[in-house]
Amino acid sequence: MKNPLSPKKLLLTKWTAAQPVAKNKHFIVTKVIQPEEENAPLDLIEIEAVFSKKTIQISWRELQDSSKWLQGWK
């Protein structure tokens, strides 16, 4: 069984896109975006493509979908 992801521990973790995103396959989590409201749950993270340095914001929960994201660089 996989370890459940914790948004607080995602910073600087490495991910491989199952389907390349704008020709990028390897990503690193560069930012965990704090919600506007103090008690709101963490939702958004910023991931950066290792090759192109482009960043995109996604919900950290998307990383749990193994059809889209694989943990580590594959």
Image: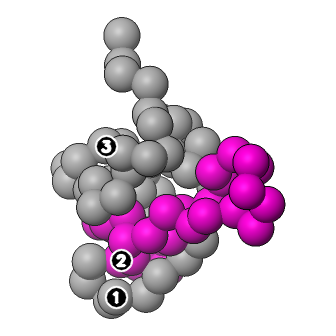
Front one among 24 and 62? 62
Report how far apart the C-alphas of labels 2 and 3 lie in the structure.
14 Å
Report how far apart the C-alphas of labels 1 and 2 lie in the structure.
5 Å
The residue type indicated by label 1 comes to Lys
Q: What residue sits 38% from the left and 50% below the top?
A: 10
Total label count? 3
**Crowdedness near tag 2: few (<14), some (14–19) or many (≥20) residues, C-alpha within 10 Å:** many
Does 74 sit above or below residue 53? above
Q: What residue sits 26% from the left and 83% below the top?
A: 51
Q: Which residue is mark 2?
A: 49
Which label was assigned to residue 15? Answer: none
Front one among 69 and 13? 13
Q: What residue sits 70% from the left and 62% below the top?
A: 35
**Which region is colored magenta?**
21-49
Does 17 sit above or below residue 23? above
The residue type indicated by label 3 comes to Gln
* Element carrying mark 3: strand
Q: Which residue is mark 3?
A: 71
- Magenta region includes residue 43: yes
Q: Earlier in the sequence, mark 3 or mark 1?
A: 1
